[in-house]
Image (cartoon, rainbow, N blue to C red):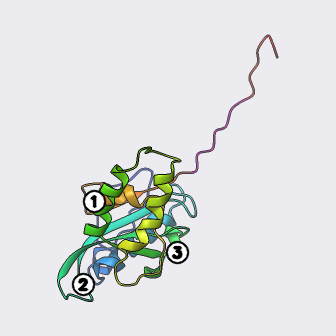
């Protein structure tokens, strides 16, 4: 493991540059995902999403294209394999905005939101059968190459309260 001088109070630093350097970009995403998912202080089992936007050779045209790989629906970061990641052509994904904008009613829990989820299949890169997750728009629209979201398990513990009305 690559030596790091930083000490982390609430998480363990598990990244190994030597191991990561041997991986292609999609396997590096899987590696990062497995590390995040392994620490239950950071994310729940089945919770969280990760993504990477990478250049890949289009299987039909041979051209280099932008592809987003995002953890698919129902996957677990800790145990994800390459097969658990959906892959989408970025240009096709971004073109969905025009369809969304034509809807009269927009927002959470609307018909257009459900229609968008079904449209993701039309943006699939490489005949990948993995279903995109509900977090796909978040990962696709952020202006960063890599995205990680974690779903924490928060346990609220309230002590018994003494009041005059109790």
Q: Is residue 131 among what the camera can see?
A: yes
* Residue wearing tag 2: 58
Work out whether residue 42 can be spotted. no
Whether residue 90 sits left or right of residue 77 in the image: it is left
Query: What range is drawn magenta here?
Result: 153-159
Disc on the earlier residue, 1 or 3: 1
Q: Nearer the viewer, residue 71 or 64?
A: 64
Residue bearing the label numbered 3: 79
Image quarter (top left, top right, bottom left or bottom right) of the C terminus? top right
Kindly state the secondary structure of the residue where label 3 is placed: helix
Q: Quadrant of residue 6?
A: bottom left
Q: Nearer the viewer, mark 2 or mark 3?
A: 2
Q: Please tell me how many numbered marks the rendered image carries.
A: 3
Residue under the point 46% across and 55% down = 150
Tag in front: 2 or 1: 2
The one nearer the camera, 5 or 113, is: 113
Residue 53 in the image, given as x and y percentages of width and height: 28, 68
155 in the magenta segment: yes
Question: Relative to residue 63, is residue 53 drawn left or right?
Answer: right
Q: Main secondary structure of the magenta part?
A: loop
Label 1 sits on residue: 5
The spot of residue 68 in percent (x, y) is 32, 70
> The N terminus lies in which quarter of the figure?
bottom left
SS state under label 1: loop
């Amino acid at each position: 493991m690559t030596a790091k001088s930083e000490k982390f109070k609430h998480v363990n630093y598990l990244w190994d540059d030597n191991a990561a350097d041997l991986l292609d970009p999609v396997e590096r995403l899987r590696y990062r995902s497995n590390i995040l998912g392994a620490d239950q202080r950071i994310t729940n089992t089945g919770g969280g999403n990760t993504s990477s936007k990478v250049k890949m050779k289009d299987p039909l045209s041979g051209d280099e294209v932008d592809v987003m790989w995002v953890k698919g629906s129902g996957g677990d970061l800790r145990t994800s394999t390459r097969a658990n990641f959906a892959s989408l052509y970025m240009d096709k994904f971004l073109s969905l905005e025009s369809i969304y904008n034509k809807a009269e009613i927009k927002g959470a829990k609307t018909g257009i939101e459900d229609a968008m989820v079904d449209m993701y299949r039309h943006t699939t890169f490489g005949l990948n059968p993995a279903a995109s997750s509900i977090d796909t728009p978040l990962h696709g629209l952020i202006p960063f190459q890599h995205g990680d979201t974690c779903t924490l398990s928060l346990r609220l513990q309230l002590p018994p309260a003494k009041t005059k009305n109790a």
